[in-house]
Amino acid sequence: LSLEVQYFLQCVACLGSSFTLETMLSIWKHQTMFGTRSAASKRSTDELLDTMVKEEYLETPEIGNYRWAHDNVQQAASSLIDEESPESFRSYIGELWIREIDEDNLETCVFDIANLLNTITADVANIEYAKINLKAAEKAKNIAAFDSCSKYVSKGIDMLPENKWDSEPGLAVKLHSLAAEAEGFLGHHSRMDSYCNEVLSQSLIPTLEKKDVYLAKLHRMANAELQYVDAIKLCLVILKDLGCTFPGGGVVGLMKALISMRKTVKMVKRTPTEVLASLPVVTDPFKLAKMTLFSRLGEWAYLAGEKFLYLYLLSTAKMVQMTLLHGLFEWSASSLSALGALSLFVNGDVGTAQYIGECALQMQERCESEAGKARTIYVVHTFLFQHVKPMQSFSKPLIEGYQSGMRTGD
C-alpha cells in the first residue's frame, strides 16, 4: 500500500465501525498534519474511498455512508498506526473530529469521539473533553450500558481541574451523580458511596442539584438493602429541604392523609376533562425533583407496612395535586390511577373510581415516558375496571402493560 493509502486507512480506522463521507472529508482535509512522514494527498477523498471499496476494505450500505467489510479489516488498519505514538494519533483525530462536528450530529458518534479523546494517558485537565465524556456516559446510561457509563464518567472526572468544585461545580455534580448511579447499578457500593459523599460534602451546592446523588443513595437503601424505613426518613429530610413537609404518623397523620385524599378526589371531579386532556408538560427542575421524590416516597411507604400508610396516601394526593396545578409529569397517570384505587377502597364509589381510571389512561397516552405505564394499566384494570367491564376486555391492555414493564423494569 502507498503511504497515502496507509495514512488514509489509519484515519478511517479511528472513526469506528461505520462513518459518513462528511465526517471523513472533515478529518482528511487536515491530513498533512498527521505526521512528519505524510505528504499532501494526490487523490481526493472520494477517490480514496472508492479505492477502499473496490479493494473490499469498505462497504457502502447507502450513498454517503461507509462501514468496514469486517472487524478484522479495521483491526489490521489500526495496526498501521505508528506504535511509538498511537495514543497521540488517536487523540488528535478525536480533537479534529470534535472541532469539525456540529452539535446536532454529535449524539450519533459521541462514543467514538470520547474513546479517541480518552486515549490520552497523561493527566490533563480539559473541560471540553470532560463534557464529551459526560454526553457519552449519559448515552450509555440510557441504553443500560452501566459499565461503559462508569468508565466515561471516571475519565471525565479525571479531566476536571483540581479546583473543580469552585470553577466547574455544575459539571462536577453531573459527573459525580452519574458515576454514583452507574456504580450503584453495577453493585459497586463502596465506589458509589465515595462519589455520593464527595457531592454531599459540598455545602455550597443546593439540595436540588444534589437530587441525583440522593436518588442513587435512596435506591441503594430501598432496592438493594431493603431498608425502606431508612429510605423514607432520608426522603422526608430531602423533601423538607425542598420546602415540603409531612405530618407525623399515628392517628392524626392518618386522618390528615384521608382528608387530603378526599379533597384531591373532589379536585379531580371538578376539573373538566378538556383541561385534563390539555395539561402542559412540566419542565421545571424543582417541580420535577419533588414529583420524583413523592413517587419514591409513596412506593417505599407502601412496602414499609401499615405504619407508613398515611405517607402513601399523602404522597399520592400530593402527586395528583401537582399534576392538576402545574401540568403533566411522567408519574402523573400512575398517581391518578392509585388515587382512583384508594378512593374506591375508602369511599366505595365505583363510578368515581371508573372516571378517575379513564382519566388516568387518557393521561398515560399523552406521556412520552413509559416510566409509569405498566403500573397505570395494572392498577386501572385490576382494581378499578373489574367492577364495570368484562374481564375478557382486559387481555390486550394487560399484555401491553406487561410488555411496557419488561422494557422499563417496573
Image (spheres, grey):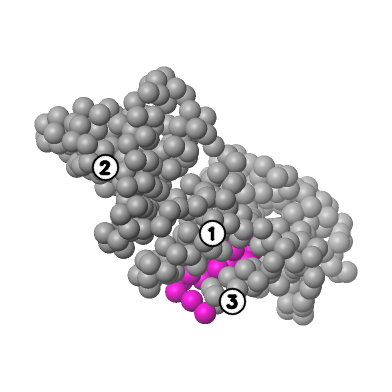
| One can see residue 35 in this view | yes
Q: Amino acid at mark 1?
A: Ile
Tell me the residue that label 3 is attached to: 194
**Magenta stretch secondary structure, dominant:** helix
Which of disc 1 and disc 2 is earlier in sequence?
1
Q: Residues within 10 Å of mark 3 (few under 14, many from 20)?
A: few
Residue at (60, 73) in percent of width and height: 197
Q: Nearer the viewer, mark 2 or mark 3?
A: 2
Residue at (33, 33) in percent of width and height: 265
| One can see residue 5 in this view | no
Q: Amino acid at mark 2?
A: Leu
Is residue 29 part of the magenta span, yes or no?
Answer: no
Tell me the residue that label 2 is attached to: 342
Is residue 187 part of the magenta span, yes or no?
Answer: yes
Disc 1 element = helix
Residue 201 image point, x, y percent: 65, 71
Q: Amino acid at mark 3?
A: Ser
* Span shown in magenta: 174-190
Q: Residues within 10 Å of mark 2 (few under 14, many from 20)?
A: many
Tell me the residue that label 1 is attached to: 238
Left or right relative to 75: residue 250: left
Q: Residues within 10 Å of mark 1 (few under 14, many from 20)?
A: many
